Image: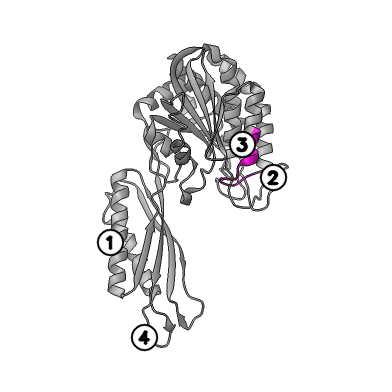
Amino acid sequence: MDNLAIVKAAESLLEFMVETRRDIHRHPEPSTKEFRTQQLIIDELKRIGITEIEKYFNTGLAAVVRGGKQGKTIGIRADMDALMMEENTGLPFTSEVPGVAHMCGHDGHTAILLATAKVLFDIRNELCGNVKLIFQPAEENGPQGGGAQFMIKEGVLTNDPQVDFMIGLHLNNRYPVGKIICKAGPTHAGSDPFYLDLYGVGGHASTPNLVKDPIVAAAYIITALQTVISRNISPFENAVVGVSMIQGGTRHNIVPEKVHMRGTIRSFNDSTRKLIGERITSIVENVANAMDIRAELDIRWNYGPLMNDEKMYADVRSWIEDLLGKDGFIEQNFPNTGGEDFSYFASAVPSVYFWVGSQGEDGIARVAHSPEFDFDEGAMKYGVMAFTKVVIGYLNGR
């Protein structure tokens, strides 16, 4: 399948992708609840002619397209879940489910992979190897670990055929349609939430000498956490430690017994990630001891840094540039501080994860996870082009 045929195939499936994306968008399902979406995918795969389908992690699934000749296996992943939030786009296909909405583009990712499945099934006899199509639930379910690691634990990468190389994508409204954006090495941060409960002795605010104040302890901890990055991490590295929630107290004249805090750690390598965890633990323990209160810290080691394989990145770049021209590929200047559980796939097998430009014609970069998020649906055909080109390049050596 040459470049012109790839482009024509993707363009011919745009109407299907728009219809599918809008259907999924109208009926969003949150993490681990993607039952309707799963059935829609199964039904469509069977219509295409793909019958080798296996469910994983309850609402996920993987389907296999076996090539006409022996060879390696490439995996392609699309996430399926929606966010627990309201939509405020005013679109004619807006969410019909209160409090749940596709505000991150996963509806588009699912449509892209379904269209790619059709293209690859049609040319299966030309492929020197296999393709495993992985539809993953619960990418947004960070505090509970995300869906990727559970699919991997259930064998999605190791069950026949065993995956040798993985690719994935995400629509990105900061870049125009027609561009593929990627970089070697770290592309997304490790994302690790932490939870902290501080227990003191409450009492009347007029007698502070008789209480053990967890609010004062919380203030000291928050202040000290500002030094974790500035005094421990090289200024040439990127990392984030932030407190995003603090709850304690009910009245102006009552010192509470408990303060609850939550925050996030973002890092781009395992050694920095480990050091940050050690410093947070040390600060919490020492402040708690100094203030004579009890602290319970829970750092939930979650999504690790997403690392693109450097050799495979070079290959992917050459294939995309062959398809779209050098102007069609943008080398990402710096990694994204957002988390992405594709990192579990990337830590298991060589992988490359890239962005697909999806900014609307008005030039407004509607940010993901906002109530107004939407993307230019024309971008989806470029996702199909990129997936198809990389599969052919990897399996057939061109």
As for residue 138 lying within the magenta part, the answer is no
Image quarter in which the C terminus is found: top left
Q: Secondary structure at mark 4?
A: helix
CB of mark 1 within 8 Å of CB of mark 3?
no
Look at label 1 and name its amino acid: Ser
Mark 2 nearby-residue class (10 Å; few <14, some 14–19, many ≥20): some
- Mark positioned earlier in the residue sequence (2 or 3): 3
Residue 210: mark: 4
Q: Position of residue 35 (x, y in %)?
A: 63, 41
Residue drawn at x 32%, y 54% as measured from the top left? 277
Q: Quadrant of residue 268?
A: top left
- Mark positioned earlier in the residue sequence (3 or 4): 3
Alpha carbons under labels 4 and 2: distance apart: 56 Å
Residue drawn at x 43%, y 72% as measured from the top left? 258
Residue segment shown in magenta:
28-40
Residue drawn at x 58%, y 30% as measured from the top left? 112
Mark 3 nearby-residue class (10 Å; few <14, some 14–19, many ≥20): some
Q: Secondary structure at mark 2?
A: loop
| Disc 1: which residue | 282
Look at label 4 and name its amino acid: Leu
- Mark positioned earlier in the residue sequence (4 or 1): 4
Camera-nearest label, 1 or 3: 3
| Disc 2: which residue | 94
Q: Position of residue 359 (x, y in %)?
A: 57, 37
Alpha carbons under labels 3 and 4: distance apart: 58 Å
Look at label 2 and name its amino acid: Thr
Q: Position of residue 4 (x, y in %)?
A: 57, 15
Say whether residue 148 is visible.
yes
Residue drawn at x 45%, y 47% as measured from the top left? 145
Alpha carbons under labels 1 and 3: distance apart: 45 Å
